[in-house]
């Protein structure tokens, strides 16, 4: 059983804070992305490697649940975990306050492979995904 | 049965387009918001009126499903519909190409009322919501 | 003497408003861009046409002067004017309140042509720019 | 002579990269802001302290000059330096590649104090600015 996870820390910047003095809800998809890219790098399959492999990986679904708001200057810890990879990349996220560990937000994203040259949707993940993941898990 | 809906048109700006030459997935929460504010105005309860009423309405959940990408200069039509209002505001969204009507994206957001002064979560919507909605439906 | 100008109207969205309850200063480069693209379209040389012509047009300089803030829901009118085109595209901007015409912001951007294939900077604008502009001015 | 400067490192995120595969020019005002907030913290006068002191500090002018583009995943080093403080806060910025030190961007921002309660512009900086700066320089 694969158990790939990673964590990034982000400090809420002033330009992400709205008139309610909390991080605007839409910015969390940026926080998710920062953690997702860190996770994809763990098995050497971040955006540049995706492109080089001949596949695009559009996001086809996002879900976010907001438990507590985040304010300017607060440091948050975003954990991304690989939940599915065989047919699509489903990644789960959990955001916690970096100091008191309170859960702030959770969610997931789903990406599917599209063959770049033919624009055809792949119903199973290209072998490069499994190959790269096996290399990581061998360690 | 209440049937409140509204539509806004948006042209995808250059600064919303990513390296894949499509609108970056996170920007759709901005498109949803533009339609949501237009919907809230229909019953006179947009952000300024929310604030004046003594309640904050944080978004506690978002869901997005992406069917087709949107490209630079494409005009999209975002429809927002009020799905629930008794205990929370659940709003559904559907984005279609403004010309050929193809469905591009759909989703929903859920907001809950928080009493601004005491920061207490309201388990039913404040009466101002029902009152304002009744006035609209009386027409 | 060429006198090319255009105007777009934008309503300040909630997600552009910061904790000071005014549009965050960095978003004005988006407002400038919306007017710039409208201006470029006037002589058929917006981003898709730039790409097709074999040139990139990176912005090499921006200047913004903020006179008055803009708030949520305010409608602004952004005017873009072509100031130089022979060697580079210098575009001036003026943002005014759409209702009372008060000046809110002004600025300019400068773009230079880069030959996409060779990545070489062009010291004079490619002839397509002059050609397209002449066609517009013929009207 | 005061010589206050600070540096932050930022990795260009995917969501900041445009269709030209470089960081969109408008995002640099966010990079400037991250360095500016770090600089303001050095003399204990970041946004929360500004608010507590009874003054707003709107940005009234920005200038950016782009020398080289930045791409996805590139780490940039943003240096902010306090250039003027007596009558207004003028901060200069220089962005360099974190690895090869090549200069990518430079610019400045100017902020002025506005008394929050009366909304009156201050022609000299409030004494809290000088006091805080003196404390830092005493070290």
Image (cartoon, coloured by chain):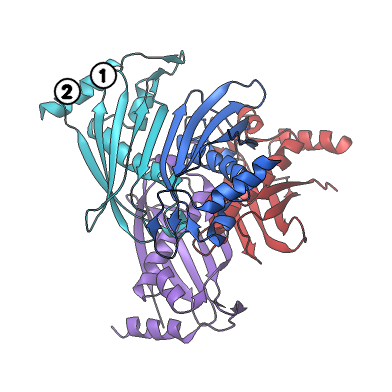
Chain colours: A purple, B red, C blue, D cyan
For residue C14, say whether it is visible.
yes
Residue C70: numbered disc:
none
Graded by Cα atoms within 10 Å as few (under 14), some (14 to 19) or many (20 or more), the crowding at tag 2 reads: few
Q: Is residue B103 above or below residue C4?
A: below
Q: Which residue is mark 2?
A: D134
Indicate the quadrant containing the N terminus of chain C: top left, top right, bottom left or bottom right: top right
Graded by Cα atoms within 10 Å as few (under 14), some (14 to 19) or many (20 or more), the crowding at tag 1 reads: some
Q: Secondary structure at mark 1?
A: loop
| In-image side of C94 versus D121 (left or right) | right
Contact (Cβ within 8 Å) of mark 1 with mark 2? no
Q: Earlier in the sequence, mark 1 or mark 2?
A: 1
- The chain that hosts pointer 1 is D
Give how far apart the Cα atoms at labels 1 and 2 are. Answer: 12 Å
The residue located at (66%, 43%) in the rendering is: C136
Indicate the quadrant containing the C terminus of chain C: top left, top right, bottom left or bottom right: top right
Task: From the top left corner, tell me how far across and down residue C16 is, in percent.
Answer: 53, 39
Task: From the top left corner, tell me how far across and down residue C130 is, in percent.
Answer: 56, 47
Task: From the top left corner, tell me how far across and down residue B7 is, in percent.
Answer: 75, 47
Q: Secondary structure at mark 2?
A: helix
Q: Is residue D120 above or below residue A20?
A: above
Q: Which residue is mark 1?
A: D86
For residue B124, say whether it is visible.
no
């Amino acid at each position: 059983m694969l158990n790939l996870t990673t964590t990034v820390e982000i400090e809420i910047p002033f330009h992400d804070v709205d008139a309610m003095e909390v991080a605007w809800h839409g910015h969390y998809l940026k926080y998710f992305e920062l953690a997702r890219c860190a996770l994809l790098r763990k098995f050497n399959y971040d955006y540049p490697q995706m492109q080089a492999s001949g596949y695009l990986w559009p996001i086809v679904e996002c879900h976010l649940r907001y438990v507590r708001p985040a304010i300017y200057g607060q440091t948050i810890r975003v954990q991304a975990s690989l939940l599915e990879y065989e047919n699509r990349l489903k990644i789960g996220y959990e955001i916690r306050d970096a100091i008191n560990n309170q859960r702030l937000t959770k969610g997931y994203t789903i990406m599917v492979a599209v063959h770049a040259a033919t624009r055809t949707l792949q119903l199973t993940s290209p072998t490069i995904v499994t190959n790269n993941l096996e290399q990581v898990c061998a360690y």
